[in-house]
Amino acid sequence: MEIAVWDTYVKRKDNQIMHFDILVPSALKDENTIIDFGKHYLKSKAFQTGRITSKECQYCHLEQATKEVEASIKGNGYAIIEMENCD
């Protein structure tokens, strides 16, 4: 499965910057849907964050999904890869 990687940086209330990727099927182009996936992910965190908009979340590149990412996308519509300050 080919996926689109959306590079995302969101400021936490403690001023750290979260860096994570939102992974979606490459055919999904609707930025609002992708940002909604990011909002859903942020709600799962135990700490408060700033808002996520198209300024914080931008298309980066296409790649082939791993089996784990593909399973997450099939189940949830998206997958997240946490990079920095996500705990």
Image (cartoon, helix red, strand yellow):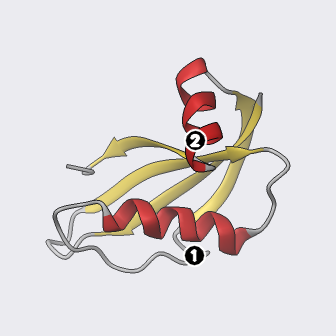
Q: Which residue is depicted at the point 30% across and 60% down? A: 44
Give me the residue at 45% from left, 70% from top: 39
Q: Which residue is drawn at 51% across and 47% down?
A: 21
The answer to which quarter of the image holds residue 45 is: bottom left
Residue at the image point whose x is 27% and y is 51% from the top: 86
Q: Horizontally, is 33 left or right of 38 in the view?
A: right
Relative placement, left or right, of 77 versus 39 is right
Label 2 crowding class (10 Å Cα cut-off): few <14, some 14-19, many 20+? few
Q: Which amino acid does label 2 sit on?
A: Gly
The answer to which image quadrant residue 58 occupies is bottom right
Residue closest to the far top: 67
Q: How many callouts does the rendering have?
A: 2
Residue 53 in the image: x percent, y percent? Answer: 55, 78
Residue on which the image places disc 1: 55
Q: Which mark is residue 75?
A: 2
Give residue 32's mark. none
Q: Which amino acid type is marked by label 1?
A: Lys
Would you place residue 64 above or below residue 40 in this image? above
Taking the view exactly as shown, the residue that stands out farthest to the front is: 75
Give the mark nearest the N terminus, 2 or 1: 1
Instruction: Give the quadrant of residue 36.
Output: bottom right
SS of the residue at dot 1? loop
What SS does tag 2 mark? helix
Mark 1 residue crowding within 10 angstroms, few (<14) / some (14–19) / many (20+): few
8 in relation to 52, above or below:
above
